[in-house]
Each structure stands twice: as C-alpha cells, then as structure tokens.
Image: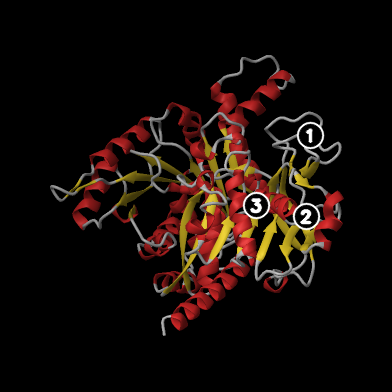
C-alpha cells in the first residue's frame, strides 16, 4: 500500500506549491523511495490543451500524450521521473467520466451527486495512480487556493481518503504565504492562521505547514504558527525566496522535512544522497560568463508560456558553465527591416513552438536573418514548419509557399495535413501527441550529443512537412536528417552550410533535465558559445 502526500495552498495563488511538491519528491527519491506525482486542477477544461498560454502558461506533454499543467514540467525536471496521463486530473475529466458512466447506466438509476459520485471518481484516480505506478509514495498537489468553490470536491475527496487509508498512510502539507511588511519590518502570521482555519472547516487538519516568505523567520514565528495552526513546531517549514529555483530542495532538506515525513509514515529514515544536487546548485550559483539567446515568440510578455524552453536553455548552459541571458523578442514586432537591429547582439536564436498565423512572419524574419548571418538557431515544432516555409520562399524560389493552416488552397503547401489525417477538425484531441521514435542520421549536427538509443521524442502538433518537397529540400542544402522510421514523417531539418541551423518537429524541451540537458539544446549552446568567442576575438582584434 502506497503512502500519500497531499499538498494544498492558501492565502494567495502562485505560492510555489508545485516547487514544494517537486522538492519533496526529489528528496524522497534520493532516499531510495519510488515516487509518483499528480496535479489535481479544479478548472472545468478536460485538459489545458485548448487554453491560451495567457491563461495557464505552457502546455506540458508527457510520453503517453497527455496535455498537462506546467507544474508537471517542474515535477519531471526535479525528480527525473516520466509521468503519465494519471498525473494531471482536472474537474473536466472527472465530470466527463461521471457523466459517461451515468449515460451508460452504471449508477443503476441513482441520483448522481458531488458526494459520493464525484468524490469517488477523484479517489479512483488516486487508486489508479497507486496501482499503475507501483510507487512507495504518491505526492498529489491540489490546484487552486483553499476557499475556492471549485476546489471543494478535491478537498472533500482527500478528507475521505484519509478516513479510508488512515493517518499513518496520508500526510497533509499546507503551503501558505507569510507576508512581510517592509515599512514596519513585521512578518504577519494572521493570513496563515485564517487559511489553516479555513482548511480545518473542511475537515482537514494539516500535518505540516510550509511558509512562503521573502525573509527568514525566527523561532518565535515558528512557535506562533505551531500554536495557532495546531501543527508540531518541528513540522513548520520555511520556503524562502531563492535566486536558484533548485535551491528549494536543499533548503527543505536542511530543515529535515524528509525525516519528519518518514516519522509520520513510520518509514525507515535512511540518508538522502544529495551530493549531485548540491553540486548542481553550487555550479548554477557560480556561473561566470554569459551567452545571449534571443527567444522569438508571440507570448513573450508571459514567460511561463515558454517555461520548459527556458529551463532547457539554462540546463544546457550549466553543462558548459555558462549563464543564459534570454532576450524576449516579440515576433509581431519583428520584420526583415529591423531584424538586424534587434538580433545582431545575440549569440543564438530560438524559434519556439506555437499555433496560428499571428506573429509568424516575424519568426520567419528571424529564421532568415539567422540563416544568412550564420547565427546558431534552433527551431522547435512550429519553428521547423516556418523554417521550411522560409527556405522554400527564399532559396527554392516558391514565393507562395505556405502552410495550409494559414492558406488552405496555396499552390505550394510545404506544411499540410496528411491525407485522411483527420475526419473533421476540432481543436481538442486531434494533435499528434506524446513520444514517437526518431531515426536520426549519424551525420546530423545533433547526433554526437545523443548517448542513448533508440530515440523517442515528445510531440504536440497537427500539421506536418509535405514529403512531396523532400527531395527538393535535400538537393538544395536543407538536409532532412531525422524522420520517423515507421511513417516517414519529417522530424529534423538542418542547413548543411551553416554552423548550427537546426529544427525539430518535436519538443526537445520536454525531455531536458537540469542534470541531463537535451542534445538539441546542448548543440545550440555549444555553437552559440563558439559564435560568441569568435565575435569577441574579432572585436578585440579590430580595437588593436
């Protein structure tokens, strides 16, 4: 029987519950426990796949093709565990399943209600995760903030789950804000008290409290929280603001949160092997030189829209002892006229994934500039498609080259839907999702960075490169270096006479980890570093 840790949040949203959950997962894994992680999201969308990035940040994709909350990216990066469809459960999924069962007569004519039918379905997702994962400990984050109406069924479900499984098999961790009033120099505990009281009114008494604060706390504050929130003093932990997100793991470990978890669950408290993680954080804190990368997208005002791309760039930087400085370039404001002025000072460019025509011409301008000026560039998903369109227009001299996503009846559909690919298009659930095998040519610029074969990469897209143009591209220097070995679909393209002008139809950022950066990003940063050094040498010589 697995042990369950439930993580809730109070006072305000965006407290970092996902980071706390991920950090606990990392520590417990380093103690030798098999872990599995879940996020219960209270919104009614079946999944975040059709949500605007402005609403919920990036959509993270698992190996088995689940479109999930961005917190799953944190879970995977921190724990280096591949998660599944069982890791992200929304209100929409729960209600859809209950309604399906009701239509099929599974409830034998009973009145279907939130309690017990909705809560039973939520508990069933916990049990499925237990059965499928074989984990020793399952960590489940409840999205939203205690007090939100939409979170109530999830909180009621975990309350019931404790009664069924027992206190020795369930642990409630409540994350709350500890505001600091700068003018008076005071830390206020009242919001944490009220939030814990609100949680208690729902029948849940937290076993641990994690305080999010921008300043350190003294023993008096810890004792006050312990007294008024009815939690043992040794179970009150601080999650202080940090410059390096991965430092949260070490901060909680130093406070012995893992020892208290083992004590609660009556598990053997073996040592956690933290040396590798400590070395990672030490390296990040001591990066000396900087590589400048331009990220060209249409959601650059919301950095969470490209969270995994940023973390993948950073991870590749760590491998080369380089700090990555990202320039957020709005693709709607970029064109052939201003491309040089905007991009000339960067050492590399990333054109990330996306959907829709808005901002696409600005991305094409960035691709053209990088191609002509030998600047290292990585195109991701939509970036590959636009790279192909730019090459077709300006090198193959097909001025009307386009994607049928934008122009259904264009004369040269470089990017298109495959024949019989979909029977009627709707936005939800029609993408090529999840991990597919990649056959990569051994003379690809990326091949030397791979050390494990066969290769499987995660996808999230609908349109594909039109193989009718494959030979034309290869003959003119745009090398199709990666294809799906089963379907023949194009997966990787790269320019032969360029240091690093590479694109992938898949999303390499989803498989990057801070200690194991993805090969495509390693290649980009390696060549960006070389490009920077050549520029600096040239500038030095010109000033002599």
- Seen in the image, is 98 located left or right of residue 3? right
Q: Which residue is mark 3?
A: 383
In front: mark 3 or mark 2?
A: 2
Dot 2: within a 10 Å radius of its alpha carbon, few (fewer than 14), some, or many (20 or more) residues?
A: some
Q: Position of residue 169 (x, y in %)?
A: 51, 48
Q: CA distance from mark 1 to mark 3?
A: 22 Å
Q: Secondary structure beneath disc 3?
A: helix
What residue sits 74% from the left and 20% below the top? Answer: 104
- Seen in the image, is 298 located left or right of residue 181? right
| 448 versus 12 height, above or below | below
Q: Which residue is more in the foreground, 459 or 475?
A: 475
Q: Secondary structure beneath disc 2?
A: loop
Q: Which residue is more in the foreground, 303 or 165?
A: 303
Q: Are marks 1 and 2 in contact (CB under 8 Å)?
A: no
Does residue 461 show up? Answer: yes
Q: Earlier in the sequence, mark 1 or mark 2?
A: 2
């Amino acid at each position: 029987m697995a042990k369950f840790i439930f993580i809730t949040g109070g006072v305000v949203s965006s407290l970092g519950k996902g980071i706390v959950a991920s950090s606990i997962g990392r520590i417990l894994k380093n103690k030798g426990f098999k872990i599995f992680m879940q996020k219960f999201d209270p919104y009614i969308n079946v999944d975040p796949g059709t949500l605007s990035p402005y609403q919920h940040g990036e959509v993270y994709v698992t190996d088995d093709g689940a479109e999930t909350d961005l917190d799953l990216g944190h879970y995977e990066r921190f724990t280096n565990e591949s998660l599944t469809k069982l890791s992200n459960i929304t209100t929409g999924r729960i209600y859809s399943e209950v309604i399906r069962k009701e239509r099929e007569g599974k409830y034998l004519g009973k009145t279907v209600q939130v309690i017990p039918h909705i809560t039973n379905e939520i508990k069933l997702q916990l049990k499925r995760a237990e059965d499928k994962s074989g984990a020793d400990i399952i960590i489940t984050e409840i999205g939203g903030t205690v007090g939100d109406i939409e979170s109530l069924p999830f909180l009621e479900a975990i309350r019931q789950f404790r009664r069924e499984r027992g206190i020795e098999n369930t642990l409630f961790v409540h994350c709350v804000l500890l505001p600091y009033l700068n003018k008076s120099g005071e830390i206020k505990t009242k919001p944490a008290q009220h939030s814990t009281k609100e949680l208690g009114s729902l029948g849940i008494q937290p076993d641990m409290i994690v305080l999010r604060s921008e300043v350190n706390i003294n023993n008096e504050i810890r004792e006050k929280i312990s007294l008024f929130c009815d939690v043992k003093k040794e179970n009150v932990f601080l999650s202080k603001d940090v410059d390096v997100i991965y430092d949260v793991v070490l901060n909680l470990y130093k406070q012995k949160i893992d020892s208290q978890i083992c004590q609660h669950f009556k598990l053997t408290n073996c040592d956690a092997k933290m040396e590798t993680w400590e070395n990672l954080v030490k390296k990040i804190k001591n990066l000396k030189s900087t590589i400048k990368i331009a990220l060209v997208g249409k959601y650059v005002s919301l950095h969470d829209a490209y969270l995994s791309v940023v973390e993948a760039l950073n991870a590749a930087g760590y491998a080369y002892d380089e700090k990555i400085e990202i320039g957020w370039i709005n693709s709607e404001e970029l064109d052939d006229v201003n491309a040089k002025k905007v991009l000339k000072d960067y050492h590399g460019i990333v054109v990330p994934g996306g959907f829709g025509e808005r901002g696409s011409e600005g991305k094409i301008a960035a691709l053209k500039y990088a191609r002509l000026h030998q600047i290292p560039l990585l195109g991701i998903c939509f970036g590959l498609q636009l790279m192909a369109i730019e090459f077709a227009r300006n090198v193959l001299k097909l001025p009307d080259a386009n994607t049928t996503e934008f122009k259904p009846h264009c004369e040269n559909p470089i990017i298109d839907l495959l024949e019989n690919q979909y029977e009627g298009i709707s936005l939800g659930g029609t993408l090529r999702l999840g991990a597919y095998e990649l056959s990569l040519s051994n003379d690809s610029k990326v091949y030397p960075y791979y050390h494990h074969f066969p290769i499987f990469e995660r996808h999230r897209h609908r349109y594909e490169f039109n193989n009718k143009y494959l030979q034309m591209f290869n003959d003119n220097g745009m090398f199709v270096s990666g294809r799906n070995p089963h379907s023949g679909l194009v997966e990787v393209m790269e320019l032969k006479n360029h240091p690093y002008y590479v694109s992938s139809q898949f999303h390499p950022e989803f498989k990057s980890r801070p200690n194991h950066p993805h090969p495509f990003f390693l290649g980009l940063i390696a060549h960006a570093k070389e490009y920077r050094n050549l520029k600096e040498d040239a500038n030095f010589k010109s000033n002599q």
